[in-house]
Amino acid sequence: MSDAQTPEVILCDTTVVSLQEAAIGRPDITAHWPTDAVARLDRAIAAISVFTLAEIRAGRIHANWGQRRSDRQEQLLAAYVLIPLDEEILNEYATLHAWSIRGHKMPHNDLWIAATAIARGIPLASCDQHFDSIAEAHGLEHVYLPRSAG
């Protein structure tokens, strides 16, 4: 945290957002997350990238959700700060994409999400360990939240 008055901003990837939503009705889904990471998320300003928003909406369309359920989810998503795409994120993505082509295969949307965090200089909370390789190679701070307790 930069100072005692200002909470840090943490970018949440798609899985984190989805599991937090699911945990509203089933707290056991995230009960295994490390308590220090959860406390950090609770204190932070939670943000998402436009790619997370697009993935969530695509999943909803694919699952053929009704309007009422979709509206409820949009209300939950409104609590996140949406980070729009800009030139700095585009440049970070280009760097990460080139790195990926050189043998570090990653899903494209995850590259965009990581590029967003790197460009803004903020940590990324995710349930995907493959972000660790970006963290090591590109200075991303990765807050890992395991998908399952196992």
Image (tube, helix red, strand yellow):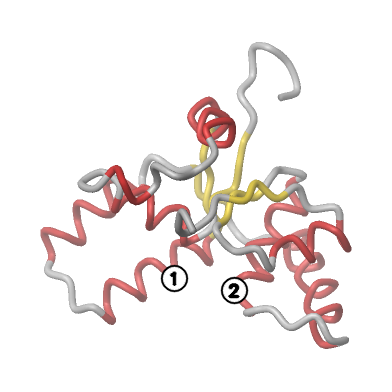
Q: For residue 13, which quarter of the picture?
A: bottom right
Q: Residues within 10 Å of mark 1 (few under 14, many from 20)?
A: some
Marks 2 and 1: CB-CB under 8 Å?
yes
Q: Residues within 10 Å of mark 2 (few under 14, many from 20)?
A: some
- Whether 104 is drawn above or below 12: the answer is below
Secondary structure under tag 1 reads: helix
Callout 2, which amino acid? Asn
Callout 1, which amino acid? Glu
The mark nearer the N terminus, 2 or 1, is: 1
Q: Nearer the viewer, residue 30 or 94?
A: 30
- Position of 149 with respect to 71 (left or right) is right
Q: Nearer the viewer, residue 70 or 110?
A: 110
Residue at (58, 30) in percent of width and height: 36
Q: Which residue is mark 1?
A: 55
Q: Nearer the viewer, residue 65 or 136?
A: 136
Residue at (38, 57) in percent of width and height: 18
Residue 117 location (% of width, % of height): 70, 52
Residue 140 location (% of width, % of height): 78, 53
Q: Which mark is residue 109?
A: 2
Residue at (51, 49) in percent of width and height: 82
Residue 115 location (% of width, % of height): 72, 62
